[in-house]
Image: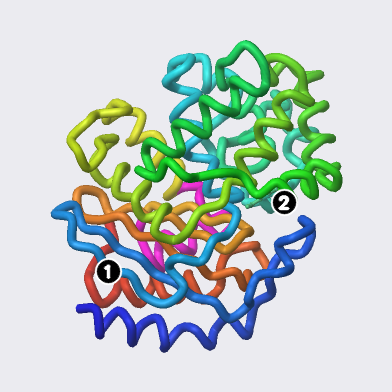
Amino acid sequence: MKKFLKSLVEKNRGISELGNVANYIPGLEKSNKHALGLCIIKTNGTIYSIGDYDVKFTIQSVSKPITLMLAILDHGEEHVFSKVGMEPTGDAFNSIQKLETCKSHKPFNPMINAGAIATSALIKGADNQERFDRLLNFFRKISENETLEINNDVYLGEKRTGNKNRAMAYFMKGEGYIDGEAEDALEVYFKQCSIEVTAKDLTKIGLFLARGGVMSNGERVVSERIAKIAKTLMITCGMYDGSGEFALRVGIPSKSGVGGGIMSVVPGKMGIGVFSPALDEKGNPIAGEALLEDLSDELSLSIF
Ligand code: GLU
C-alpha cells in the first residue's frame, strides 16, 4: 500500500507546475511550490505518511469547519445558523458580492470568509485572548497535538493586509450578523487561520470527523450531529466555488486552505491530510486535488 501511495504522490507532484502559491498574505509566498505530502490514518489506526507530510504550513481556511464545531458547542445549532447560512455561493471564497446584493445580507455559509468571520465571532470567552485560547485548545485536542501554535508573522501580515475581510466584518456587524465587535471577530479569525499544522495534523482531525466526533482514545468531543454538520458543509462548500466539480471528481468531504492544506474525511473509514501549496485559479491546491481524485478512484472512496 505504501508503495502504491508513493507512486500516486510522485505521479501528481508535477501538476504543481500548473499552479501558484498564494502571495496575497505576506509569508505564504515562501512555500515550496513543488511540495506534495499525503497522510492517511484509517479508523483501525493504520497510518501512511508520504512525501512532505511533516512540513509545517498555516491552516488558513481548513480552520473553518473546526471553528464551526466549537461555535455550535458554545451556542447551539439554532443560534449559529441564525448568523450564517448553509448554502453554497458559487462565488470566490473572499467575495463580498452576495453580502451586499442578497436581501438578507446574511453570509451564505461558514466555509467562505464572510461566514467564517461571523462564526469566529461566536467563540465564547471573557476577552479575545480567552476566546482564541479556547479555540486553539480545541484544535489541539482534536488533532491530538498539544504543540500547535500560531505563526505570528503570518498572523500579523494578514491582520495588516486583510482589508477585504475587515470590510466584510464591518458590513456584517452593521447588518446584525456579528456578535460583539467586528475587530474582535477579525482577531480570532486571523489567528485561527495562522495556526501552523502539518498534513498529519489535518489527517488526525479528518479521522476525528470520520469517527463522528470521537477521538482515538474513544472520548466523544462533539455530537454525531455536529460532526455531520461539519462534513455536510465540507462536501457542499468546502472547496470554494469548485465544490460541485470536486464532489463529482473526488466525492469525499474536504476542506481546502490557501496555505496548501486539504483535510478530507471518508466517513467510518479514514482521515486524509494533504499539503500542496501550488493553487489553481479558485484557490484550491492543484496537485492535491488531482492526488485525491486518483486516491478516490483507486480505492473507491467516493461517498456517492
Ligand atoms: N486567511 C485567508 C483569508 O482570509 C483564508 C482563505 C483561505 O484559506 O481560503 O483570506
Give whichever of discs 2 and 1 has the lower sequence position: 1
Q: Which residues are magenta?
A: 236-252
Place residue 116 in its image quadrant: top right
Image position of 261 with respect to 70: above or below? below
Assess disc 2: are there few (<14), some (14-19) or many (≥20) residues with their C-alpha within 10 Å of its C-alpha. many
Question: Residue at left 77%, top 30%?
Answer: 169
- Of the pair 283 and 219, the residue shown nearer to us: 219
Label ID, residue 48: 1
Identify the element where label 1 is drawn.
strand
Q: Amino acid at mark 2?
A: Val
Any magenta on residue 248? yes
Q: Nearer the viewer, residue 35 or 152?
A: 152
Where is residue 56 shown, x and y percent of the image?
Answer: 54, 61
Question: Which amino acid type is marked by label 1?
Answer: Tyr
Residue 168, horizontal then vertical, whole percent: 78, 34
- 23 in relation to 180, above or below: below
| Magenta residue check for 118 | no
Magenta-drawn stretch, dominant element (helix, strand or loop): helix
Residue at the spot of label 2: 154
The percent coordinates of residue 123 (x first, y second) are 56, 22
